[in-house]
Structures are given as structure tokens and as C-alpha cells.
Image: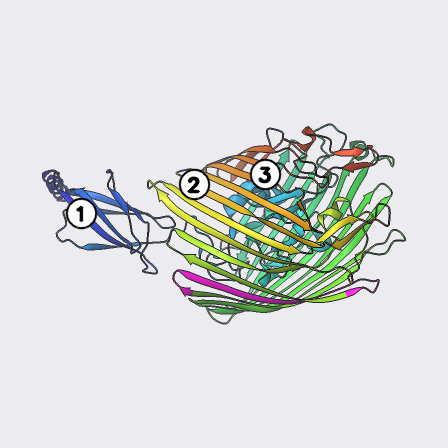
Amino acid sequence: MSKILWLFIAMLSLAGVQAQHSYKALIKDKNTNEPLTGVTVRVDGTTIGSASNEKGLVHLNNIPSGIQIVIFNYIGYEPLADTLLFPFQEDSTHNIYLTESTEDLEEVIVTSTRSSRSINDLPTRIEAVTAEELDEKATMKPGEIRMLLSESTGIQTQQTSAASGNQTIRIQGLDGRYTQLLKDGFPLYSGFAAGLSIMQIPPLDLKQVEVIKGSASTLYGGGAIAGLINMISKTPGEKPELSFMVNGTSARGLDVSGFYSGKKNKIGVTAFGAYNGSTAYDPSGNGFSAIPQYGRVTFNPKVFYEFSPKTKLMFGVNASHENRLGGDMRYINSPKDSLFFERNVSRRVSTQLSVDHNFGKCSHINFKNSVSYFGRDISKPVYLFSGNQLASFNELSYANHDEKFDWVAGVNLWTDQFTENKQGNYTSRSYNSITTGVFAQNTWKLAPVFTLETGMRVDYAMLSNPEGHSKGEVFYLPRLSGLFKFSKSLSARLGGGFGYKSPSIFTEAAESRAFQNVHYLNFEKVNAERSYGGNLDFNYKTVIADEVTLSINQLFFYTLLNNPLIFNKDSLGANIYTFENANGHLETKGTETNAKIGYKDFKLFLGYTFVDAERHFNGSYSVVPITAKHRINSILMFERENNIRIGLEAFYVSSQTLSNGFRTRDYWIFGLSVQKWWGKFIPFINFENFTDTRQTRFGNIYTGSAINPEFMEIYAPLDGFIFNGGLKISL
């Protein structure tokens, strides 16, 4: 009977092939019932198509008689195909409801912004590095997050020491000390502990990384002037997870790690352990290590306990120990006092405690506590620097969420005590810091097209040292942001705020000297750095020709930093370096452009950064050293889920200015990565910097003698071409 029916329909189609008909539809979001603008609608197998207008209406003409399939496509929504028989018995407007897709949608963020809204609905601009990207980058540098950050638009990782290999982060042209590092919302590695920090954070237990560029001081304090990076750890799911990774490099590096996650009844656990190490590596043959010899052990266990459906607890420990040795390859192979070396022995132990209680679906209270210890010993010929840092963080916050408002308010206490183990007769550089703060932030959806975010933080920071110098300052940190949704395809954000940074000797400049001959800070003579900054960005997404997805983000940024702390050689003493507030300001401005194009199994990521970083000190102008004005990052990815992933990367860095005024050359870096899935086994291989771009190809890395070298500023890679490969096992 069904065959006869379809034959009858086909005959009707043939009989009316010459007839032309129209189709009207009103397209809405299935959940909100709001009209959708820019939905592409086409008749399958024809050139007939159009897009819905601002009211969600679409009108198609010249549709042939018979059975036709009308296809609806809209980025962020599940595609819909509707089979219709033309002509219709009635001339009416059809209601079409599209459902938001679960693919490629940003996760709900509750950590960086403490909001229940999705990234797309927040006035604060957030860039999320998803689990897929983390998985890809983790195979390139399993022992650190440097690769993950350096390939992001607008973020520059800068090596500060040739001997130790230390790297720091620069966002929007500002030094690493102006970026706040977090893990699961807990402050991470600041002050003395910031040394070697991004070299000692393995990415393999992370499920997402969130990046906020520009001032983010309301919730996390004044240190987030350039922005903040929040690393979110994996948590126990309903299914247990057990995975291992082994990786080896052509520079004779070795990485071995394992991760476990499980949950039973009210108790869940995660545990991550890793060994990361390498022999010393000198690709240029100049006699000095480009990669130091090192060995590091990391162990991060966590326990999750559910007292009730409303009350949950998390307790975790992060612990690591590393021995790192760089310098003259002859010393590394056979230690002799007459040769140059730099040894770093570091120890980290920190705890994290979080207790969260829900009063209902819309409100909850949270308490956080962390205690961290960091010890580091730096030894060089006839020089030793040793110290210990003990820091703590306590916070109590309350949040309330509903359809129109998101409120969060709280108080916190942050302590930082550094104790130097003196090796001579100079004045100790020990200090104590206590910061208390109170904050409040509100996100208000004033209309479907506009959301406003306001915030205020007040901090009181007290600094003191054993010499009796002390200073207390109050900081008022307002913040304002707005989200404008012009359509489902086009939106814009505008925001800005204040920030501050308390004075500290632990900067990139002092780190590059291993703190040798760096004078202590007299807190009565130096002031905190204060900043003002703002961002404006536009977001556009669409579907082209029904198969190509396109999303573009265009960001404009500006930051002004008054009286920044600068590092100078003291005119009164030989080779003594001091910190003082500059007479003037530093400003950075520029743009970031991100584009993502998707077609079937291919994805193309394109990024461009323009940074104009200037110093205006004592009435004169100069550019900020080691800051590339132009950077390009591009990644072409081919991926078939659970089958194969191939990535080709290209990065460009323009000429930079050194502190002595010398202009460097520009350069390109290329990379290739391949992963293949065979069930639970995933082998991988990566060819990083396969054109072997190195600073030592452009000139000498040091001046003076090999016994007492003075290293040049680092503006390009030192390690050159390195390939690595290994195996991931997921059980």
C-alpha cells in the first residue's frame, strides 16, 4: 500500500513539474521562543535559498511542485531538514523551531567569572581553551603549559634566562608579573614562586583553560592588570577514567604520566602523577645548554566528598620537586669550579580546600582556603641565592543567580611571607605582605540585546621587611562591562577597569640575573603601580554555502600603567641593581584578530596581534623592549573523531627592540603534529620548529668569556628543531 501511495505522489510531482510555488516560515529558538536572524534556508538539490530577517521570517519563491526537502542551518544550532509536498493546501507561515547544538558550544563557566551564564552571554570576554585543544597541545610539551599559551593570539611566552630556561607570560604587551595565574579559582605562583612557574605546570590533568585579557581585578585582586589565566582541573565523572602517557624527544627528554578519576557513592577522587626530565641540549654547538638538564616529579591528588546534595567539599594537594642545571656543557658533563653553571633546585607544596553549600537552585555560599610553600636554591660560580615562600589565601563568597541578575560578593585575605637564607653580609630581601579585600559584582540582563556588568573591589595591602620599612595602601578598583547582542550572529563587548601591583623584586629583569646584586626594596620609598585599561571587541559568526562555518573576533585594547617599577643599575655602587618608580607612565594599545573557519573535517585558525607598547619616562619616549609589534599564528587542522588528527602550524614574529636599542630580525616557526586512534591506544608524533629557527643562527647568545658570560636578551627560540613522539593509553 505504501508503495502505491509514494507512486501516486511521484506522479503528482511529474504532473506539476512546471508549476512554481512559494514557502514562508517563522524561525525561532525552541527554548526561548525568540526569533532567529540570519538562518540559512535552502531547498535541497536546487539553487533556491535565502536567510531569515530580523523578525525570523524567510520567504522562498519559485519552488517546483512535488516532494522537496527544505534545510535549515544556523551556527550553534542543530541543522533541520523538513520534507514537504508542494503545492500546499493552504498559504500560511510555518513555524520552525531550532534546537541549540551541544557541539562547539562554550561550556558554562562558573570559575573565572563565578557566573551561571555561558561564555556567549557574559559581558566579560573569555577565551576558552577546550579539552580537545588541550589534548592536542599536551602531546607537544607534556611537562609544561608554555606551548599551550604561546600559540594563543595576544599571548607571548618570553624566555628570561638562557641557563635555567625560565619562561614568563606577556599579555597585551605587559610583563608577566601583571598576569594572574589561577588553578580552579585559587591564586597560583606569585611573587618568589612565579619563578619557573609555567615550566612546572603540566597540562595533562586539565579539562579547560580560561583566559581573560585586560583588567580582571574585581574578583581576583589588583595583580590581574594584563589579564588572568585560570586552569580548570578534571573532576570525577560517573565513569572512571584511567590514562597514561609516555613521550620522548630528540633532545633526549622523557615524560611519563598517569591520571585516574573515579567516583563511588558520595566520594570521588582524582590523582595525577608525572615525571618530566631531559638531558642538557646544545643544538648550536656554542658550548652552552639551550635546554638545561632537569628532572621533576609531580603528584596532584584530590578528594571530593558530598555531605548532601546541597553541600560539597573538595580537598587537594599539589606537590613537585625539580633539579635543574644549565650553563657550560663541560660543567654539566663533568663539574669543575672554573666553568659557568646555574643550578636551580625547587620545591612546591600547596593545599586547596573548597566547601560549597547551595541554598537552592539560585544561590550558594563558598569558602576557599589554600596554603602554599615554595623553596628555591639558585647556585652559580661563587654565588648562592636561597629562600622560602609561605603564602595563604582565604575567601568567603556568596552568589545568587536568576534569569536577570547574577550577584557575587565576598571577602578575602591573602598573605605572602618570603624569607631569604642569607649567604653574605648584605641586607636581607625578606618581606611580609598581607592583603585584605572586599568585592561585589553584578551581571544584569537589562534587555534581550543588552547585559550590563558592574563591579567594585576595595583592597588594603600592607608590606613590611625586617629592616623596619613598611607601607599600607588602600586601592579602589571599579569595573564596568557591557554586552550588546545585535543578532544571533553579531555581538559586541565594551569594558574596562582599574588595577594595581604591589612592588616586588621578583620580576623578569631580576630573574634574568638570578637576583644577583639586586638590592632589597625600601617599601617607604617605592609605591604600588596603578593601571587603567579597557577592551572593545566584536564577534561575528555565520554559515556560508550551508557547509562552511565562519567566526571572527576583533579586539581593541588599551592599558595605561602609572609610575611602573623599573630595574636600574645603581649609580652609587658597582654592579648593584635597584628598583624605583619611573617618572612617567607605560601604555600599551593594539588589536587582536581571530578567525575560525570550518569545512567538514577541516578547521583553520588564523590570528593576528598588533601591539604598540611605549614608555614615557622623564619626558622621553621609547618602545618597551622584547615586544613584537606584529605576530601571526595560524593552524590548519584535519580531524576525524576517534580516528586521526593532523595539524600544521605557522607562526610569525616581527622585529623587536632590545634594551640597548638594537633591532632584532623577524622570523617564522613551523610545526607539524599527527595523532592516530587505535581503540584505547593513541600514538603521536610532533615536529616542532622543523625549519630550525634559533636565535643562535642570528648572532651570539652571550658576550665576554665562557667562564664569566653575560647573556644577551632572548627574543627567539634557543632550542631549534625538536621532534617528539609517544603513546597515550586510555583505559
* Residue at the right extreme, as displayed: 425
Res 229 visible: no
Choose between 232 and 636: the one closer to the eye. 636
Is 246 in the magenta?
no
Measure the C-alpha gap from mark 3 to mark 2: 23 Å
The label on residue 114 is none
Q: Main secondary structure of the magenta part?
A: strand
Q: Amino acid at mark 3?
A: Met
Mark 1 residue crowding within 10 angstroms, few (<14) / some (14–19) / many (20+): some
Find the magenta span and give its range: 446-470
Q: Quadrant of the N terminus?
A: top left
State the residue at coordinates (50%, 53%). 536
Choose between 530 and 103: the one closer to the eye. 530
The label on residue 22 is 1
Choose between 514 and 187: the one closer to the eye. 514
Is 451 in the magenta?
yes
Report the side of 301 relative to 451 (left or right): right
State the residue at coordinates (45%, 54%). 492
